[in-house]
Structure formats: C-alpha cells, structure tokens
Image (spheres, rainbow, N blue to C red):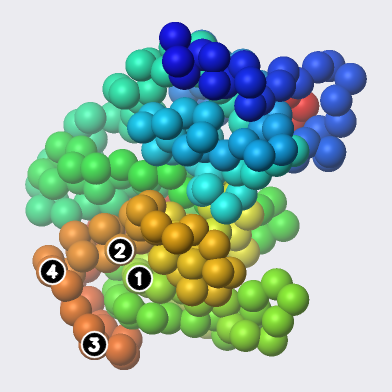
Amino acid sequence: MLIVLMVSALVSAVSSADSPKKHRGPCEIHYPSDATVEWDCRIILPGGSLETIFGEYWVDVARFNRIDRRHAHSGVSIKVPRRIEDLASFNPLPLFYQAAEEDEQFILIDLTEQFLGAYEFGALRFATPIASGNGLNETPTGAFRLTAAHLQHQSDLYTIEGTEQPYPMNYALRFHVNREGLSYWIHGRDMPGYPASHGCIGLYDESMQKEQYGVLKDPELNDARKLFVWVLGGETDEDHVIPLSNGPRVHIIGKAPGHQPP
C-alpha cells in the first residue's frame, strides 16, 4: 500500500495527448516481455526519483525499464508495474540456452529485449539490461567471440557530451572488428532506457557517471564490472588491452526496437 501511495504522489499518468518527444523514455519502447507484467506509463514529477517512488524496489523498476537513475528524472515517462512484486521474477531471457550447453561461459544478447545473459554450460548465471545500437548505428548480429578486455578503455570516435573528453568505455570486452577495422565492445555507459549506442553494447556503470557527471553519491548499478570480472575470472588492475585467446562465445540475436508512442 505504501508503494502505491508513493507512486500516486510522485508520478502522473501519460494521456493520449502527451507528445512522445516531450516525454521520451522507456514508455516509447515495446518489448515482447512487456506482456508478462501489467504496467502503466507514468511521468516522473518534479522531486521524484526511482528511490523516492519505489523505495527498496527501485532496482527492479530500473531494470524493467532498462534505465539508470541519472536518466530517470522529472518529465521522463517510465513503465510502472501495477503490482511491484511482479518484477521480482522478471527475466526476458531463457533460463537454459541449449546452444551454450557445452560452453563454460557463453553470452547471449537479445536486441529485441535489450538484455544480455551470461550462461555457464547452458544455465543462466545472471542477466542485465543493455543499450544497443540506436538505429543509425546498428549493432551487428550473429556469432562472435570475445577477443580482448580493457579495464579503462576509451572511445576513439566519440566524446562526453559538451566536452572534448573521450567517452569512457570502462570494463570493455571486444566481440567484433568489422572489415573497416571498427571495433565493437561490450562496456559500461549511460543507460537512458532505449537503444542509444553507436553499435556497441552498453551496460550499467553508475560509478563512471559519478566520476564524469558528479551525480549518484552511492553508485550501485555496475553490471559492466560484474560481467568483466565474470569473463576474466577475477579482478584486475592492468590498464592495457588484455588479449583473450579463447574468450567466451557471443550470440547476438533479434532487432533493436524503435521508438513507439506509449
């Protein structure tokens, strides 16, 4: 009951007259797994945040919306579950992936669902939301293999908005190099709640956002680090590209969803 009252006080419903451009956010993206949870599209009101609205359940809501806390601000429309407890078991990926049953480590990336799964001998070990290619810059699909890891990688092409500083790609795992020599990585980045990358696969990295944007006093979501440590089998402080001679296989399937009216 407390959560229901807080939601009513801090978010408002999105009407059919609202402009998708005005309230750009997770409500504009439709995933097949949306059908597994009853939800309403609501706008975060001034003063509201995922923590103040949903309390201890804010992480579940963030993952369901594929969004981080910095982007879940006033004016953004998010998907609010009618029963918060429904998100406890939410997972859009298969618990067992037969194509990976012989692999000690295997990564499945479903662009349609915007989710990544880490598998061990076919069994799902953990899953995390992603931000893939934004439509103008597509993420390649097919079968790949991780070939390199870099703890503190940086983009050679893109900068932090409003600066000349290279965009940080912490906990980077390279899965593809195209014919033009352009590398594609899985790495930490901003998670705005919709496909937003230039082709790489982005994961939560709130520690980077605290460092670069000065927000989030208590970074908690750091799935990029979790996947990086899982692949390497432990922590590392080596600040150079680490070749992976027999890295985990990576399957990328589906097609990233486009923006749709809520």
Expressed as whole percent of the image width and height from the top left, the position of residue 219 reads 40, 58
At x 47% / y 18%, what residue is drawn? 3
At x 20% / y 38%, what residue is drawn? 124
At x 54% / y 21%, what residue is drawn? 6
Badge 1: few (under 14), some or many (20 or more) residues near its Cα, within 10 Å? many
Decide which of tag 2 and tag 1 comes sooner along the chain: 1
- Identify the mark at residue 234; answer none if there is no mark: 4
Kind of residue at badge 2: Arg
Q: Are marks 3 and 4 in contact (CB under 8 Å)?
A: no
In the image, 154 versus 163, the foreground residue is 163
Badge 2 marks a residue whose secondary structure is helix
Residue of label 2: 225
Q: CA distance from mark 4 to mark 2?
A: 10 Å
Q: CA distance from mark 4 to mark 1?
A: 12 Å
Q: CA distance from mark 3 to mark 2?
A: 14 Å
Q: Are marks 2 and 1 in contact (CB under 8 Å)?
A: yes
Kind of residue at badge 3: Glu
- Identify the mark at residue 238; answer none if there is no mark: 3
